[in-house]
């Protein structure tokens, strides 16, 4: 796609075939396709809830509590992050309804701001967000398995377990998209069962009079803006699945209907309530100090109430949930490489598809290598901050694209319209959060920002290399 072709994206409507190929329709056919509602409102809500609730709630509570210092302040952060996520999701929904094309926020930035910002969005996702998230998820599975094996402090064992999970789902995703899609549905049930059990257990424990941790909920609360920003980033990690729902799971037909904002509001409010109740359950049995001191919070919570009898079942449930999240990462992360490859911004070999299995084999292998690299980082908190920080930078580019499109395309059809002041305040909130996290934790935040911005010089280097005919010819022959 050349720069001159960016504007027509606003008028195109594409059907995604097997998640990778797209076919443009005529306006009439597009309208007929979009007006056919493939799923109900309840089903859309269920899809979003299922995609967002993942392994994050099993690992983010520690970081939020560590930075906020008290039960009450931690719960407030979980609720406020939910509101923040909802505003971002509604902004993205406006863009998604304008441009229901493959690539998501990559396409937004490419269309509104040009090739370089588009490349930067894809770069941030592929090189920072996706691998740090999957690295954290696979290591979480390793932490829970290592704990029930009695080797919870053995970082080598944890890393090996993470590597095995990454390798297993690489082979499964290379074999069949249909297989892993069905497997995702099965694995999703594990997280629902585990969270339901934790919430019910916590409510029962509180009902029995165990309320000592709730007596002074705001005692010891952090007031440092930098700590609050880090807590918000840690909590945001557990919500970031809404991006997956909006661009890869919900049918494009839903974007033509007015059910999308309703689905987003109901689902994110539901998710926020579940996250708050899960943390209330944790605090019913564990003090803030106990939550901070362990990585496997859910396992410690169950062990304190029931002893070690049920810990194996809960640990296996968390591991299956993590496996489902890694599997979902493979399903969605390769789409950025596919979209960038079509636009000649990365080696086009990364957008190739295995004809026999209809799977993006080169992109999957590349993402697996990136997952491996980040899975070797022993600190889960560092991985979570990398992922959440990258998401904020990427979203800020998309929201700037939204403001540009409001100015340059004021008459474009918008099924959902978010006022520009709300978009601007959201961008300001992102910049404030990133700036405060840089002040509070300069090394981790600076490293994450450096990885994000390194895409800028790389873009111009790759653009310079395309001037050489031999490289272009090799790339074309590979494709």
Image (spheres, helix red, strand yellow):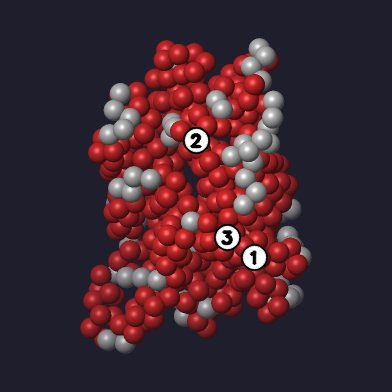
Q: Residues within 10 Å of mark 2 (few under 14, many from 20)?
A: some
Instruction: Identify the mark nearer the N-term, 2 or 3.
Output: 2
The percent position of residue 357, horizontal first and vertical second, equals 32, 49
Please say if 80 is above or below 100: above
**Mark-to-mark CA distance, 2 and 3:** 22 Å
Residue 257 in sight in this render: yes
Q: Residues within 10 Å of mark 1 (few under 14, many from 20)?
A: many
Instruction: Identify the mark nearer the N-term, 3 or 1.
Output: 1
**Mark-to-mark CA distance, 3 and 1:** 14 Å
Q: Residues within 10 Å of mark 3 (few under 14, many from 20)?
A: many
**Mark-to-mark CA distance, 2 and 1:** 31 Å
The percent position of residue 80, horizontal first and vertical second, equals 68, 46
Residue at point 39% right, 61% down?
127
**Residue 353 as seen in the image, left or right of residue 36:** left
Q: Which residue is mark 2?
A: 292
Q: Which residue is mark 3?
A: 436
Residue 173: image quadrant is: top left
Please say if 470 is above or below 209: below
Give 349 or 234, whichever is nearer the viewer.
234
Give 171 or 221, whichever is nearer the viewer.
221
Helix, strand or loop under label 2: helix
């Amino acid at each position: 796609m050349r720069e001159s072709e960016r504007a027509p994206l606003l008028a195109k409507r594409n059907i995604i075939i097997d998640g990778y190929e797209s076919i443009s329709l005529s306006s009439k056919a597009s309208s007929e396709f979009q007006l056919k509602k493939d799923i109900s409102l309840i089903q859309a809500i269920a899809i979003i809830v299922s995609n967002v609730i993942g392994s994050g709630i099993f690992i983010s509570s520690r970081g939020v509590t560590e930075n906020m210092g008290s039960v009450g302040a931690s719960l407030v952060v979980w609720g406020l992050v939910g509101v923040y996520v909802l505003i971002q999701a509604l902004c993205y929904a406006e863009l998604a309804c304008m441009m229901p094309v493959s690539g998501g926020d990559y396409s937004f930035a490419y269309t509104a701001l040009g090739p370089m910002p588009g490349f930067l969005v894809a770069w941030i996702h592929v090189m920072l967000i996706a691998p740090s998230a999957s690295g954290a998820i696979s290591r979480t599975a390793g932490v829970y398995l290592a704990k029930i094996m009695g080797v919870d402090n053995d970082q080598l064992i944890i890393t090996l377990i993470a590597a095995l999970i990454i390798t297993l789902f690489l082979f499964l995703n290379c074999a069949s998209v249909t297989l892993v899609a069905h497997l995702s549905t099965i694995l999703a049930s594990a997280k629902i069962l585990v969270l339901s059990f934790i919430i019910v257990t916590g409510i029962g424990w509180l009902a029995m009079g165990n309320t000592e941790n709730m007596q002074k909920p705001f005692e010891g609360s952090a007031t440092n803006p930098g700590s609050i920003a880090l807590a918000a980033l840690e909590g945001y990690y557990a919500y970031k699945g809404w991006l997956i729902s909006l661009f890869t799971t919900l049918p494009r037909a839903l974007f033509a209907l007015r059910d999308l904002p309703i689905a987003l509001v109901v689902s994110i409010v539901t998710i926020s309530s579940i996250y708050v109740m899960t943390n209330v359950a944790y605090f019913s049995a564990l003090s803030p100090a106990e939550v901070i001191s362990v990585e496997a919070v859910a396992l410690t919570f169950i062990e304190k109430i029931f002893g070690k009898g049920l810990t194996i079942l809960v640990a296996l449930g968390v591991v299956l949930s993590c496996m489902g999240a890694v599997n979902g990462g493979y399903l969605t992360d390769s789409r950025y490489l596919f979209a960038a490859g079509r636009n000649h911004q990365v080696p086009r070999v990364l957008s190739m598809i295995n004809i026999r299995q209809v799977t993006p084999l080169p992109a999957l292998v590349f993402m697996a290598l990136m997952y491996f690299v980040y899975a070797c980082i022993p600190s889960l908190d560092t991985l979570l901050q990398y992922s959440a920080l990258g998401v904020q930078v990427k979203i800020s580019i998309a929201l700037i694209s939204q403001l540009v499109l409001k100015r340059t395309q004021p008459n474009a059809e918008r099924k959902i319209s978010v006022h520009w002041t709300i978009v601007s305040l959201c961008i300001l909130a992102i910049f404030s959060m990133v700036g405060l996290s840089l002040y509070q934790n300069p090394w981790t935040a600076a490293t994450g920002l450096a990885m994000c911005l390194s895409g800028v010089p790389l873009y111009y280097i790759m653009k310079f290399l395309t001037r050489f005919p031999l490289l272009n010819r090799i790339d074309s022959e590979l494709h």
